[in-house]
Image: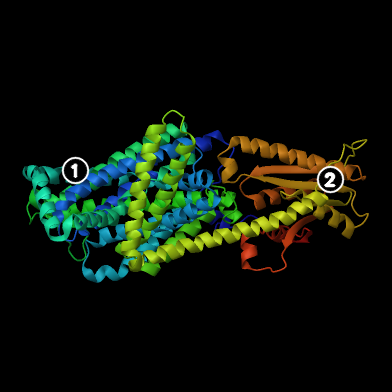
Amino acid sequence: MKPSWLSLERLKRLFLGAPLDPFSPKVRQHIALAAFLAWVGLGADGLSSANYGPAEAFLALEGHTSLALYLALATGLTVFIIAFAYNQVVALFPNGGGGYKVATELIGPHAGLVSGSALIIDYVLTIAISVASGVDALFSLLPPHWQAWKLPIEFLVVIALTTLNMRGMKEPIALLLPLFLGFVVTHVLLILIGIGAHADALPTLIPATVSETQDLAGSIGMVGVIALLLKAFAMGGGTYTGIEAVSNNVNMLREPRVQTGKLTMLYMALSLAFMAAGLIVLYLLWNVTYEEGKTLNAVVFEAILAELFGEQSVLVHVGLIITLFFAAALLFVAANTGFLGGPAVLANMAVDRWMPHQFSQLSDRLVTQNGVIVMGAAAIGALWVTGGEVHFLVVLYSINVFLTFSLCLAGLCRYWMMHRREKGFVMGMLQSGVGFVVAFSILLVTLVEKFLDGAWFTVLATGFVVFLGYSIKRHYEGVNQQLAEADMLFGNAQSAPPARELVPDPKARTAALFLGGRDGVAMHTLLAALTLFPNQFKNVVFLTVGEIDIEQFHGQEKVARMQVEIDTRLERFSNWCERRGLATATYRAYGTETVDLLDRLSGEVLETFPNTIFFASKLLFANENFFTRLLHNSTPLALQRKLHSRGVTMVILPMKV
């Protein structure tokens, strides 16, 4: 019976698109990002921080606005320091992973766990803060009584972005590209026009800054001035968020990856340094003050447009609407970075068993779908808990960003200390060392200044993810140890080829076994099936799928090695059976949807061997709970439901661990 047009499969294809072939070079080329698109998809997070980072730093000066000139210079310089340091990460880790991989391989696994946990929270907050800031920009144009609708609108935006990202990484970027370019054009023009309109005040900025610095030092001391500047600099720490996104996702870039990554980083550094420093100078030149219900950018842009067209001109309102629309749009593009980077970190941690294996699995759209869904759900939770308050989210955000920066840059420092005789040591160590000092200083100041204002919440959330990761790893290691014992007990089933090859009889009764990745489990299934049904089967059929997860997809040599390993295993089990008088046949497939592929193979088996009973093993834990069900896939149960619905017999054999 053909599925109706309302079937789940048809709805899935309507919203998510047709499946993609993971082996197709054209598909790989299609989803790989060139430097320009990577700047849009990954650099938007950094560039969008100009909507809130510079404003937070400027307001933290507590009215001593002339000191903002120091902030403008320090901000632009810091962007380049961090960006150039992260270029080293791109070169050292061309398969991606960024701060997580650096901390893991250059410091140690537990440092990697902390860095990865911080990155997960960071990307959740990337989505939350970007969406909240974008909606704030739009609501700056609306009357106050509309404010009650902000949170529901934020939820809808997150849901829409989640759906887009389940289609694939390039689709949302292509859709949001015009919005990104609109932001760049409108904001660059307004910054240039705004600075040009008050260009006559530029020569007085340095004398005014020096004078106020001296006056303030006379009243609170130079230490007090430095403390105020450090606080403001730290409060603007959100400006530098997103710089690490490229290094985390190098594997998504077009070949040659390293060159593409470095070019993307250059685009990001130039655009962010100009935008952030330029906005701070604008605030200073135009004497901007905070207005309730408006962002600082909205206030200064409205003033610029009013002077350009006249306060009563309709063009002021139209220009402000267009500018803030593109500001909100860029923030939504930036939120998309969280959907690219967050699942990538989860996938890398899942490969190392800090996270459930399911997070490394690809959907038929070649997307780590489970990670996308989790990031979207967590972002909605963060918005709900914080009420979408941008100031509070910025505090939460900055802590983990600079924790990751600090661990990554410390790892690079350690790398250069171990490679002191290599070419480029001096420059590499200088970039890494200065970057570490800057990042760690911002982390400490933010943590101390804002601990009671919400920073404690980030520490708690990150600590929880670290604890969760440690517990998952410990569970997997315990199970792996027991399965390794089973491999030693049953898995040495290596057998020489039989004296003569047996030809299976299609009419004879047949046992079909779904093989997983462990020899011990496979042999347990085979022996249990033959014991439960003694002398019943003349044929044994083996079915297996080589799963293309995130690790295999970005490493062709790993796919080739997996294919060889599968062929070797199938041959070994076939030899074992044939030496005992059982004819065999093997079926294999490769792809991302394991259950669907095994279901398809079972149909092929039934066409040749209609008198077949299917068998699979499922791990049985002494204390079965939600945790164990989450960490171990339910492939046997899903297959059993599919086969039983077609009237086909399948037996699940429990294996205690």
For residue 225, which quarter of the picture? Answer: bottom left
Which amino acid does the dot numbered 1 rest on?
Leu
Pick out the residue farthest to the top. Answer: 423
Mark 2 neighbour class, 10 Å CA radius: few under 14, some 14 to 19, many 20 or more: some
Give the structural element (helix, strand or loop) at label 2: loop
Compared with residue 96, is residue 14 higher up or lower down, i.e. above or below?
below
Q: Is residue 274 left or right of residue 474?
A: left
Q: Position of residue 283 (x, y in %)?
A: 16, 52
For residue 24, which quarter of the picture? Answer: top right
Tell me what residue is drawn at x 36 percent, y 68 percent: 386
Q: Is residue 218 left or right of residue 511?
A: left
User: Marks 1 and 2: which is nearer the front?
Assistant: 2
Give the numbered dot on residue 189.
Answer: 1
Give the structural element (helix, strand or loop) at label 1: helix
Q: Position of residue 532 (x, y in %)?
A: 88, 60
Give the numbered dot on residue 493.
Answer: 2
